[in-house]
Amino acid sequence: MLHLFLTLFAVTPDNVGLPQVAIDDASLPNALRVTFTVVGALAVLFIIIGGIQYVSSDGNAGDIEKAKSTIIYAVIGLIIALSAFVIVQFTAGQIQ
């Protein structure tokens, strides 16, 4: 099916305009490291934002719940990101 599509529309890997990227042994770990760093930093940022929302809620129940939700979801995201990092490191053989 894919071959038929490529034949009909004369799309080949050479003329689609996409850059060719060589994958070596260092590129995947670097990409994963950057990804986990960004996700972790975003989770910490959202925990800080939730804390600021909580402090500035002025006792408004709706704002307090919104701030708590922000903090809870950020902590859950951070736990998932850390778990994914540990799983990737373990399966890659870097943790014994």
Image (spheres, helix red, strand yellow):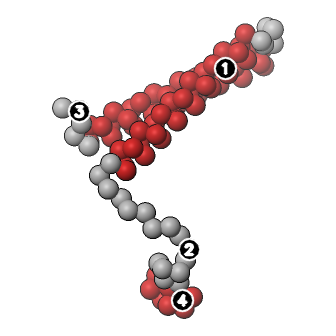
Residue 8 visible in the displayed image: yes
Three-letter amino acid code at the position of disc 1: Gly
24 on left or right of 32? left
Q: Dot 4 lies on which element?
A: loop
Dot placed on the residue nearer the N-terminal end, 4 or 3: 4
Check the image and name the residue furthest to the left. Answer: 96
Three-letter amino acid code at the position of disc 3: Ile
Residue that label 3 marks: 95
Q: Is 71 placed above or below 29 here?
A: above
Q: CA distance from mark 1 to mark 2?
A: 43 Å
Q: CA distance from mark 3 to mark 2?
A: 40 Å
Q: Is 8 placed above or below 30 here?
A: below
Q: Is 38 placed above or below 16 here?
A: above
Q: CA distance from mark 4 to mark 1?
A: 52 Å
Check the image and name the residue furthest to the bottom. Answer: 8
Query: Residue at image x 36%, y 59%?
Result: 23
Residue that label 1 marks: 50
Query: Residue at image x 54%, y 29%?
Result: 41
Residue that label 4 marks: 10
Dot placed on the residue nearer the N-terminal end, 2 or 4: 4
